[in-house]
Amino acid sequence: MSSRLRTDVSIDKIKDYLMSRIDTTSPVEVEKVGRYLKHIEMYRRMERTVKKEGVSVKTENGSQTFLKAHPLLGEMNKVNSAIINIERSIEFLDDDGMPKYSSKDLI
């Protein structure tokens, strides 16, 4: 029996969770959540394409034929980095509705 981690959480569930953890009166924070969700949707579309077409693609150049990595793999890495950066910039609230601070904020 294999235990697979489910990563197919719906965009709506992610949105609801994030919106419950930010100051929804802040247009900047709401915009960050929107961008975060759009990047997740882009990543998932690229992931489906790569899954369908394979991680390597056959390229023909005249008489030469060779395999190379799917071009979307590099783009997926860029989108993933953007997702992480957006997530880091979101100001999450603690359980009392107050902004969470880290040790970096003290410097």
Image (tube, grey):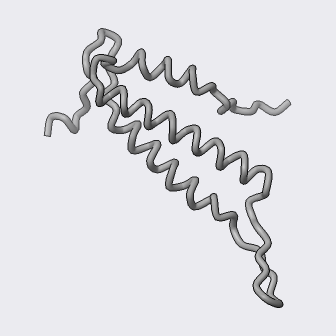
Q: Considering depth in this image, is 5 or 52 the residue closer to the camera?
A: 52
Q: Residue at x 44, y 43 (%)?
A: 84
Outermost residue toward the right? Answer: 1
Q: Going by the image, does 92 lie left or right of 99?
A: right
Q: Going by the image, does 70 lie left or right of 30?
A: right
- In this view, 95 is above or below 8: above
Outermost residue toward the bottom? Answer: 63
Query: Could you say where residue 65 lies in the image, as x and y percent from the top left?
Result: 81, 82
- In this view, 9 is above or below 54: above
Query: Could you say where residue 102 lies in the image, as x and y percent from the top left?
Result: 25, 31
Q: Residue at x 65, y 49 (%)?
A: 46
Q: Considering depth in this image, is 31 or 94 the residue closer to the camera?
A: 31
Q: How many marks?
A: 0
- Which image quadrant is residue 13 in? top right
- In this view, 16 is above or below 64: above
Query: Could you say where residue 60 lies in the image, as x and y percent from the top left?
Result: 79, 80
Q: Considering depth in this image, is 5 or 93 the residue closer to the camera?
A: 93
- Which image quadrant is residue 85 in? top left
Query: Could you say where residue 52 lies in the image, as x and y percent from the top left?
Result: 79, 51
In which quadrant is the N terminus drawn? top right
Q: Going by the image, does 28 lie left or right of 62?
A: left
Q: Residue at x 39, y 40 (%)?
A: 86
In which quadrant is the C terminus drawn? top left
- Which image quadrant is residue 88 in? top left
Outermost residue toward the top? Answer: 96
